[in-house]
Image (tube, rainbow, N blue to C red):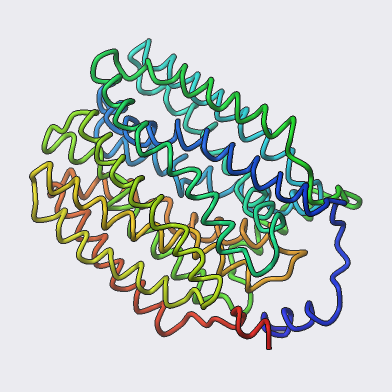
Amino acid sequence: MDTLEQTRTEKLIPVQVPVAQVTPRQMRENLGVLAGSSFLRGAHTSIYNVIWQPFVLSLGASMPTLGLLNSLGGMNGIITTLVQPLGGWFADRLGRRPFMLAASAATIIGYALFAIAGQLNLWTMLTLGVIFLGATALANPARSSMTAESVRVDQHGSAFSLIMVAAMVPGIVAPTVGGWVADRFGFVSFFPIAIALEGVALFLVWRYLRETRAPNGDGITWRDSLAVLRRSIIPPKGLAGFFIACAGDSFAWGMGWGLLYGMISETYHFSAEQLGLMSSVMSLTWAVTQMPIGRYIDRRGAKGMMIFSESLGIPLMLIWMTQSRFEIFVLSQILFAITAATWVPVVSTFLTRQVTTEERAEAFGRLNMFRGLVAFPAPTIGGLLYAWGGMRLPLMANLIGSVIVVGILIFFVHETHTPASRES
């Protein structure tokens, strides 16, 4: 049965899934808890994203080594990739909350290991911390699914955008302040603050978040778990173009943008405070534009927005390749924020509309697994390109990749389930 037939069947015959008994009021409260924990996580993540690459370089690591660490446990690292399909599959059977709690605990352990590495001035110890940070992606499918399950079907775009805005708002101020602190007191001073913020987020989830998926773990076997990994290598029927486009996007941006802060700090000697200001401008723009974009895709299809988003990467890479002034890099963050705001929640909304409720978390895990397997070498390749030819080479690779992804989106991605088709 293809994806369109599945969605039509879902309209006519209620899917028999073990959904927890959650009232509309509790659903709204869940969305508030998810937004609150995202806010706290965004506060420390926005600083971490700014200082991580200069921090690694300050301990004596090279740019290729930094790329290798990102390939291990970064945004699309191999650890990050492998845990997500399993996390989604188990979350559909054991509930969402346990994986979100485990992710918070892993975050705290990872930050503690980074602090120890900084105190000992030993970059090799970062590897273990990176593994823990990569393992936190175990909760990504559960978190996305719970967000979708906390609102009506016609509000998915707004819900994903709200969570994204909550994560972006602290980034308006936190990176600049965090960069200032790092410049004056050292990078290690950030990690105790990050641990405290994630501890509060863990408490909110543990105390106030209500489960939306009743546990139904009967018959779970290791053989089934391995089968999840095997089928995650192949895109679901009808979604091959979408999966390939997302993987291509992650690979292209992993080579260029994924190492941007490290490259400009080493090439142009921007301080942590300057990098923080860049991040603050990006977060402000993202927060302002995200909700209107969410409401837009609630009423219209997501494919056009993804094409628009990927196309913006072309002028952005040209700016970063040809300019060296700090002021230009600050202004370029406005364009980057619009690129991100029109991609991240739009991808989640597109996938939510294409799959049935009972397979939602696994579908998110499969997408992240597929694009991670393709993209995890990208930071390492980007680091090697930088060592070979400076900043322009990895940014050029990013530009070429964006052009290819635009073509894939235009010709090979098919949106079969839009708001209009759902109502017809």
Q: Is residue 43 left or right of residue 369?
A: left
Residue 233 vs 215, above or below: the answer is: below
Where is residue 324? Give x, y as percent: 8, 46
Q: Residue at x 62, y 64 (%)?
A: 155
Q: Quadrant of the C terminus?
A: bottom right
374 vs 52, left or right, is right
- The answer to whether 297 is drawn above or below residue 80 in the figure is below
Residue 119, position as x, y percentages in the image: 37, 11
Residue pictured at 39% horizontal, 58% vertical:
289
**342 horizontally vs 229: left or right:** left
Q: Is residue 101 above or below residue 191?
A: below
- Front residue of 83/246: it is 246
**Residue 193, image x, y percentages:** 46, 19
Outermost residue toward the bottom in this view: 424
Q: Which residue is at 68% across, 52% downward?
A: 88
Across and down, in percent, residue 109 comes to 56, 23
* The one of 272 and 380 positioned closer to us in this rendering: 272
Tell which of 326 and 407 is nearer to you.
326
| Front in this rendered view, residue 280 or 101 | 280
Residue extending furthest toward the front: 25
Q: How many marks?
A: 0
For the N terminus, the quadrant is bottom right
Question: Is 9 on the left-hand or right-hand side of 179?
Answer: right
